[in-house]
Image (cartoon, helix red, strand yellow):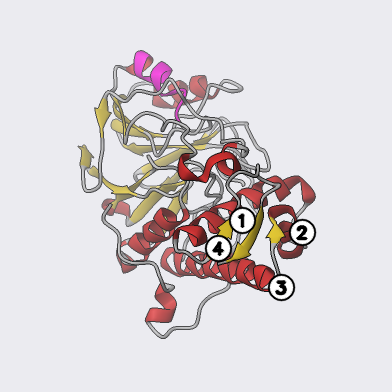
Amino acid sequence: MPARDDHPSSSTPASTQQGEPQPQLEELLDTHHDPAYGEAVQVAPLVQRVTATNPSPFTFAGTGTNIVGGRRVAVIDPRPDAAGHTEALLRTLEGRTVTHICITHTHSDHSPASRALAEATGAPVLGFGPHPAADAGRHGAAAKAVQEEPGDWDFVPDGVLGHGDVVAGDGWTLECLYTPGHISNHLCFALPEEQALFTGDHVMGWSSTIVPPPDGNLGDYLRSLELLIARGDRDGVYWPTHGPPITAPNRFARALLAHRHRRTDQILACLGDGPATIPAMVARMYTTTPKVLHPAAALSVLAHLIHLSEEGTVTWDPAADMPAATYALA
């Protein structure tokens, strides 16, 4: 749900490491997407997409469920059964065999209909694991005060997938990439036959991804971006669960990584002028963002602050509730 480990180091953006100019994320975002709701659209020879009627500021045009294969298929992210989405999927799947139901992660706009689809088709549900327990850890009240994205607390996979695992069918292969950050149980699925990567909420073409504490972790997210960047030209297209495809995926991932580092620089600049609260930093940093999205922006700033505190760069009073806490340079 946007709102909006085997990973290399992410201390420096990959484009900087390679001596290349950093692309600007804002120039690459695609906010024009008009899906055919409730209908199967053939987006690639091996991929159909059915988009649910759940558009919002956080799901963009809605949740896109991907169907991979021909007569024997895998279904990725069936989402909740809102506005007849499961029925639309079953109509599309009529006459075919569902062999696997694969879940990128357990936010409520991705996984809850998996059990109903499994009961209707007999296919096993596969994912990294149950929804992670809400544990604010050492960040205490500041993290607890942030409303966590709705989770699918009832999700229990029939089979557990991890980094490097492979789900295979007739003429298709899904390779699992463990990509924590947005949430600790997030997976991406590579489809080498199409040079495609299903990115869930890890990378989206219309917006940056929120990393919501307490379970979201910016350090993990940056390492997961580096993992995708290191794949180079193995992926010719990204298919996020929300929004349009990303057709220059490696360039986009590098831009997203650079964007995160610029946000860190902005936060350090704010704190360089003196101690500040999260609302004050959001007002200064997100001048062109609609105020309805400022709570999402506050989550993003908090994720950066937690990351900076773990590095020893920023301090704050853990006894104060977020957003009332005041943050300062260490």
Sequence-first disc among 1 and 2:
2
Q: Are marks 3 and 1 in contact (CB under 8 Å)?
A: no
Please tell me whether residue 295 is drawn above or below residue 52 in the rendered image.
below
Q: Quadrant of the C terminus?
A: bottom right
Q: Residues within 10 Å of mark 2 (few under 14, many from 20)?
A: some
Q: Is residue 230 above or below residue 135?
A: below
Q: Nearer the viewer, mark 4 or mark 2?
A: 4
**Circle nearer the viewer, 1 or 4:** 4
Name the amino acid type tagged 4.
Val
Residue 327, label in figure: none
In space, the residues marked 4 and 2 are separated at their CA atoms by 19 Å
Magenta part of the protein: which range?
111-119
- Residue marked by disc 1: 301
Going by the numbered disc 2, the residue's amino acid type is Ala
Give the CA distance from mark 3 to mark 4: 13 Å
Kindly give the residue lying farthest to the top in the view shown. 119
* Residue 207 in sight: no
Residue at x-position 49% and y-position 29%: 79
Relative placement, left or right, of 109 versus 69 is right
Residue ID at (52%, 69%):
261
Query: What separation in Å lies between label 1 and label 2 (alpha carbons)?
Result: 11 Å
Residue located beneath label 2 in the image: 283
Q: CA distance from mark 1 to mark 4?
A: 12 Å
Q: Quadrant of residue 99?
A: top left
Q: Which residue is mark 4?
A: 314
The Cα–Cα distance between marks 3 and 2, rounded to whole angstroms, is: 15 Å
x and y percent of residue 305 in the render? 56, 57
Q: Earlier in the sequence, mark 3 or mark 4?
A: 3
Residue type pointed to by label 1: Val
The mark nearer the N terminus, 3 or 2, is 3
35 inside magenta stretch: no
**Label at residue 273:** 3
